[in-house]
Amino acid sequence: MHKYVMHGFGWFLHEDHHRPRHRLQKNDVYALVFAFISFLLIYNGLKQGIYLMAASGFGVALYGAGYVLFHDIMFHRRIKRLRYRPKNSYMKRIINAHRTHHSTATREGAVSFSFLYAPKKYAVDRDTRTGDYT
């Protein structure tokens, strides 16, 4: 979804996420949109007894919670007091893959669109630019 929505027709909202950071970004609108979709699916699914619809809404909410926790807090450190230093090699790999994804400020040439999966080619011990463990 990230590749086709955020780097596709939704680039106008996502573009500032690939540029120097500000406290709020146009990209944050995605959280509101998906929270609204999640709410509608859960509410209507439970009200109408269509439990697959409600389950889909809970799935969207769970994805959103994971996005905030892993992407916004761990990767981009949007809560400055919480500094996550991964010790697990897989988490280091995920963070390195995401750094690679952000190495371009345009939608062309971007790679590694997942935030919970990273192929082994992104495995490294230290980030050569910052010295941090990745």
Image (cartoon, helix red, strand yellow):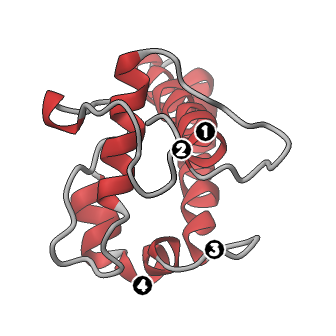
- Local crowd at mark 4 within 10 Å, few (<14), some, or many (≥20)? few
The amino acid sitting under disc 3 is Arg
Tag of residue 71: 2
- Local crowd at mark 3 within 10 Å, few (<14), some, or many (≥20)? few
Whether label 3 touches label 1, CB < 8 Å: no
**Residue sitting at 36 percent across and 43 percent down?**
96
**In the image: residue 56, left or right of residue 16:** left
Q: Can residue 82 be seen in this view?
A: yes
The amino acid sitting under disc 1 is Met
Circle 4 SS class: helix
Between 1 and 50, which is closer to the camera in this rendering?
1
Alpha carbon separation for disc pair 3 and 4: 16 Å
Whether label 2 touches label 3, CB < 8 Å: no
Alpha carbon separation for disc pair 2 and 3: 14 Å
Circle 3 SS class: loop
Alpha carbon separation for disc pair 3 and 1: 15 Å
Whether label 1 touches label 2, CB < 8 Å: yes
Between 89 and 111, which is closer to the camera in this rendering?
89
Q: Which mark sits nearer the N-terminus, 3 or 4?
A: 4
